[in-house]
Image (cartoon, grey):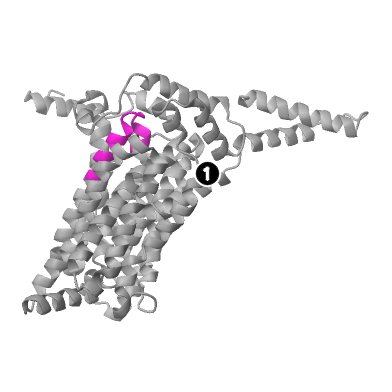
Amino acid sequence: MLDSTGLLSSVNKRCDMEIGLVFPHCHIKNSPVMRKITSQNARFIMKGNDLNLMLMVTSCAIGGTLQYGYNLAIMNAPTIFIQNFVNETFRERWDVQLKNYQVTLVWTCIVSIYSLGGLAGALIAGPMSITFGRKKTMLLNNIFLMLSSLLALTSRAAKSFEMIIISRVLVGINAGISMNVQPMYFGESAPKHLRGAASLSSAIFTAFGVVLGQVVGLREILGSEPCWQYLLASNAIPGLIQLLTLPWFPESPRYLLIDRGDKEACINALRRLRGCEVQRSELDEILQEQAEAKGLRPSRPWELFADRNVRWQVISIITLSSAMQLCGNDSIYFYAYYVFKESGISPDMIQYITICTGTCEFTACIICNLLIERQGRKILLMGGYALMTVWAIVFTIALCLCLSLPTAGVTGVLPTEIFSQTARPAAYMIAGSMMWINLFIMGMIFPFLVSELGEFCFVPFAAVCFLSALYVGLVLPETKGKTLSAIANDKSIFGNKLLERIIIVLSTEIPLKL
C-alpha cells in the first residue's frame, strides 16, 4: 500500500522504464512534456475510479430517498378518487354521507400519518444502523416498503381505507430510516473531495422521486380512477431494484473499522469503492477516528442534549431540520391540488403544473451538487433561505426552486460532518425526528392555511426562511474540505460569541453588559 508520494514516484519510474526500452538513446523521457504526462497519469490513478462509488450511490438511493420524494408526490394525483373511496366506504358500512370538511379531515389523516411513520423510522434508524450496519439496514428497510405496497394494492378490493392509512405508516417508516441512514452511508463511504456531492445526491434522488411520482401519477398512466391502487403500490419497484443491486456493494468503510474493528474489511471496502489501491492518507484519517472513538460507546440522543461540547451542533441540526419543513416546501406535494385550485388554475391542468414544480426542484438539486464543493455549505444554506424569504412572498414555484438548490441537500450532509462516528447515529435520530414532527404539523395545518389565505398561503413561511438564513450566517461554520475528525474535534468553529454570551446571560438572568 503506497501513499500519494510513493504512488507518484512509482508511476514516474514505470513510465521512465518503458520509454527507456523503446527509446534507449533518447532523452525524451526527461522532457517537460513527458514529466507532465506521467504526473497526469499519477493523478488519474490517485483519483481512482469513481464509477463504483457512483453506482453504489445510485443503487442505495433508488430504494432510499427516492422513495421519500416518490411517496410525497403520488398522493396528489388520486386525491379526489381516494376521497370518493372514503365517502363510499362510510356510506356502505354505516349509511353515513360525510360532509366536505369531514372528508378533508380523513384525507388529511391519510396524508399526515406518513409523517408519524417517518418519525418512528427516524427513531429506530440509529439503533438499526449500529446493530446491522448502514448497508444491511437499507436492505432490511425494504420489508416495511413491501408490506406497505401489498396493503395499498389490496385496499380497494377489501373496501378498507384503514389499509391505506396503515400502508402510509409503513412507507413512512421506510422513508424515515432511509432519510437518516442513506446520508450517513454516503458520507462515510465517499472520499473527502466528494463527500459533499455524494451526500447531496440524497436530495437529488428525492427530487427525482418527486418528478417520477408526478409523471407516474398522470391520468394517462396510473393517476386515473381505476388505477389509483396500483399507483400507491408502484413504490415496490424501486425497492426491488435496490434489493437486486445493493448487495453487490460494500459496507461503509468507517463502520467496518471504527464500529466493528475489522481493518481488513475496511481496506477491501475502500479498494472496491475507489477502484484502486487505498491511499495511506485516507486510511490514516479513518484510523485516527478509530483511535479517538476507542473505548466510547455510541451516544444516545438525550446524551447529546446534555453534552455542552456539542451544544451548538445539536442546536444547528434541530434548527435546520425544522426549517426544512416549516418553510412549507413539502406541503406543495401533499396538497398541490388545493394550492393550485385556490390559485385559480384549471383542475385539468394541475397535474401538469405540479410536474413543473418537481422539475424545478430536481434541476436545482443538480446545480447544488455541482456547487457544494466549490462554494461550500454555509453560503448555499444562507443564500437559499435568504432567497426563499423573498420568493415565498411572490409565488410557489420559485419557492421550490430555491429550497432544493441549497437547503434540503445540505441539511442532510451536516450531521455526518459535524458529529463524531459514535455520536452520528444519535444526531441523525434527532435531526430526523425534528424533520418528521414538523412535516406532520405542516401536513395537518396546511389545508386550513390554504382555505383561509388562498394564493397567499406561503407568505407566513417567509419569517421562517428569514430567521433560518440569519441563524446560518451567525452560527453555522463552513466544513468544506475538512476531514470529519477535524470538524468534530474543533470546538472553536461553532457558534457566535455574541450569541453565546446572550444565551449564557439569559440563562443566568444577569443583565447583559456590552
Can see residue 317?
yes
Q: Nearer the viewer, residue 274 or 342?
A: 274
Query: Is label 1 in a helix, a strand or a loop?
Result: helix
User: In the rendered image, which residue does mark 1 sit on?
Assistant: 53
Residue 371 inside the magenta-drawn segment:
no
- Residue 128: x and y in percent read 31, 39
Q: Residue furthest right?
A: 25
Q: Nearer the viewer, residue 407 or 147?
A: 147
Is 272 left or right of 8, judged from the image as shown?
left
Please report the residue visible at 81 percent of the width from the left and 29 percent of the height from the top: 16
Please report the residue visible at 39 percent of the width from the left and 37 percent of the height from the top: 133
Please report the residue visible at 36 percent of the width from the left and 38 percent of the height from the top: 132
- Corner quadrant of residue 321: top left
Can see residue 457?
no
Q: Quadrant of the N terminus?
A: top right
Please report the residue visible at 22 percent of the width from the left and 72 percent of the height from the top: 158
- Residue 326: x and y in percent read 21, 52
Residue 133, above or below 331: above
Q: Look at label 1 and name its amino acid.
A: Leu
Mark 1 crowdedness (10 Å alpha carbons): few <14, some 14-19, many ≥20: many
- Residue 100: x and y in percent read 10, 75
Residue 446, above or below 82: above
Q: Magenta residues, as a range?
A: 415-433
Is 457 left or right of 191, judged from the image as shown?
left
Q: Nearer the viewer, residue 498 or 324?
A: 324
Residue 426 inside the magenta-drawn segment:
yes
